[in-house]
């Protein structure tokens, strides 16, 4: 039987010659795996944060739109609510204010490519930063397709007040580009306009 030769490295410990490189080999194998795990956790946490941010934006916009009813500045206030709730997130790309058919409906597919008369108003990222004066000017027409004064808020109207949805789309920019690519994050919320007499 072969006898192992061991060295005394420090007072309390002994190390055998065959064990000297084990720690280095183990570290070389385990460290990349731990790094990938940490990077994956960071990436998925950032994606979850961006999803929640977009959801908060659509929810805030829908609440404001529901309370605004026929106010001509309703969509302006929606844009400002989305901007505030998303914290000025640079990756918000599109906001759509649309007429929903039910409380569980979805944004009409035709609205995803542009404004549709009497159905939806489509805004892009640059509209989040516009001033109230610009919004109210006659030259600004993005709010004309489904103008706020034409929305139904009467309790006695057939079907009652309109359902209004707010759709917000943005981009999650990948932090590492190793685990996930950049991807689209979106959410929409539908609320009924608050009734008026």
Image (cartoon, helix red, strand yellow):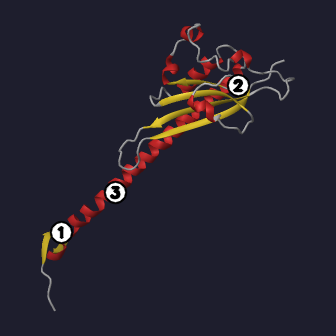
x and y percentages locating residue 148 in the rendered image: 69, 17
Q: Would you call the spot at circle 3 few (<14 residues within 10 Å), some (14-19), or many (20 or more)? A: few
Given contact means CB atoms under 8 Å apart, are the residues at marks 1 and 2 in contact? Answer: no
Q: Residue at x 49, y 27 (%)?
A: 87
Q: Residue at x 61, y 28 (%)?
A: 60
Label located before the other in sequence (2 or 3)? 3
Task: Please tell me whether mark 2 or mark 3 is closer to you in this view.
Answer: 2
Estimate the x, y position of residue 2 in percent, counting from the top left. 14, 89
Against 38, is 102 above or below? Answer: above
Q: Say the numbered circle drawn on residue 66.
A: 2
Earlier in the chain: of badge 1 and badge 3, it is: 1
Which of discs 1 and 2 lies nearer the camera? The answer is 2
Cα–Cα span, label 2 and label 3: 48 Å
Looking at the rendered structure, the number of numbered marks drawn on it comes to 3
Q: Nearer the viewer, residue 166 or 82?
A: 166
Quarter of the image for the N terminus: give it. Answer: bottom left
Question: Which residue is painted at 18% across and 69% down in the image?
Answer: 21
Q: As rendered, which of 60 and 167 lies closer to the eye?
A: 167
Can you say whether 63 is above or below 176 in the image? above
Query: In front: 1, or 34?
Result: 34
Can you give x and y, in whole percent of width and height, for residue 196 in the image? 81, 19
**Which residue was labeled with disc 3?**
34
- The residue singled out by tag 1 in the image is 21
Residue 44 lies, in percent from the top left, at 45, 47
């Amino acid at each position: 039987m072969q006898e192992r030769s061991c060295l005394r490295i420090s007072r309390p410990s002994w190390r055998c010659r065959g064990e000297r490189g084990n720690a280095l080999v183990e570290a070389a194998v385990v460290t990349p795996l731990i790094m990938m795990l940490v990077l994956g956790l960071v990436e998925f946490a950032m994606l979850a944060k961006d999803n929640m941010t977009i959801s908060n934006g659509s929810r805030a916009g829908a609440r404001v739109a529901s309370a605004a009813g026929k106010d001509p500045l309703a969509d302006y206030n929606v844009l400002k609510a989305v901007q505030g709730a998303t914290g000025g997130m640079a990756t918000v790309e599109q906001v759509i204010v649309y007429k929903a058919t039910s409380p569980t409906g979805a944004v009409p597919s035709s609205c995803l490519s542009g404004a549709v008369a009497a159905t939806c108003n489509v805004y892009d990222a640059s509209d989040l930063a516009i001033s109230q004066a610009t919004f109210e000017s006659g030259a600004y027409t993005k709010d004309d397709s489904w103008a706020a004064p034409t929305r139904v808020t009467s309790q006695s109207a057939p079907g009652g007040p309109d359902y209004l949805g707010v759709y917000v789309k943005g981009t999650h920019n990948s932090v590492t580009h190793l685990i996930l690519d950049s991807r689209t994050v979106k959410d929409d919320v539908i609320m009924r306009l608050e009734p008026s007499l």
